[in-house]
Amino acid sequence: DGGITQSPKYLFRKEGQNVTLSCEQNLNHDAMYWYRQDPGQGLRLIYYSQIVNDFQKGDIAEGYSVSREKKESFPLTVTSAQKNPTAFYLCASSLLAGVFTDTQYFGPGTRLTVL
Amino acid sequence: DQQVKQNSPSLSVQEGRISILNCDYTNSMFDYFLWYKKYPAEGPTFLISISSIKDKNEDGRFTVFLNKSAKHLSLHIVPSQPGDSAVYFCAARDISNFGNEKLTFGTGTRLTIIP
């Protein structure tokens, strides 16, 4: 069945290590997004991609990097430059880039804890 | 600068009664609004949306009202059921960023339905 998968659900890393979070969708959606959620805050956009091999920075891109080599995959790397990486990370996708009424659908999320 | 505000962090409602969740926004370029529901440790799920050309949109037990002059929208759930207990996020899209489908989220309201 179709959907967005994120793995792993829980991830622990030592401070100073880079870590890559996986996001895969089999919905044939054009656009994909990465958000971060912190306690008491709304979702904040990290990066988004409207088409393969292209992506744009969101509101809080510093310390993160992404790639979009395949339509169905949009991995997020949390680098050692990210000052406060412990958070709940959510990946989303939407069918058509450039359609403002399009709905974003979310994956189940990955909780990253940096020790 | 919080452009989408949900001023009530929590709300408790008796089962069977009406739940009203509120959302205010400051950016006059927001032209499309969505409500998402989120359970703990899961990704948000889309509930209902409304375009600025409407002032009301209804889907089963869920109705969203938009007051553009007041820059205010609300989500009504009636009758409220125990499964409605979750965090509800309001989100808005800036139509002037056509082609860049970024959503701006509020901080969420935790709704608890009391049996």
Image: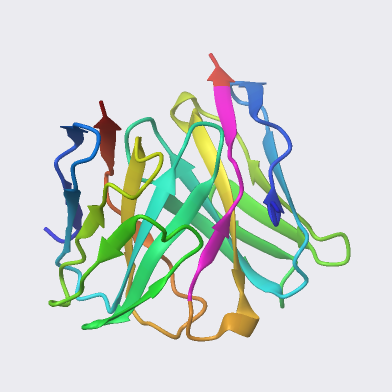
Q: Nearer the viewer, residue B65 or A76?
A: A76
Residue occupying image coordinates x 78% and y 60%: B26
B18 versus A99 height, above or below: above
Q: Nearer the viewer, residue A84 or B48?
A: A84
Q: Nearer the viewer, residue A113 or A97?
A: A113
Is B104 on the left-hand or right-hand side of B43? right
Residue occupying image coordinates x 72% and y 75%: B29
Is B1 on the left-hand or right-hand side of B111? right
Residue B14 position in % (x across, y down): 63, 19
Residue B61 position in % (x across, y down): 56, 45
Residue occupying image coordinates x 43% and y 67%: A103
Furthest-top residue in this view: B115
Q: Is residue B51 visible?
A: no
Is A18 on the left-hand or right-hand side of B91? left
Colour scheme shown: rainbow
A12 versus A85 height, above or below: above
Q: Is residue B111 magenta?
A: yes
A96 versus A17 height, above or below: below
Q: Is residue A24 magenta?
A: no
Q: Nearer the viewer, residue A76 or A16?
A: A16
User: So how many labels did they put on this image?
Assistant: 0
Q: Which residues are magenta?
A: B101-112
The part of the image, by quadrant, that contains residue B77 is top right
Residue B102 position in % (x across, y down): 50, 69
Residue B78 position in % (x across, y down): 62, 38
Q: Is residue A86 visible?
A: yes
Residue occupying image coordinates x 19% and y 76%: A28
Is B37 on the left-hand or right-hand side of B20? left
The part of the image, by quadrant, that contains residue A30 is bottom left
Furthest-right residue in this view: B69
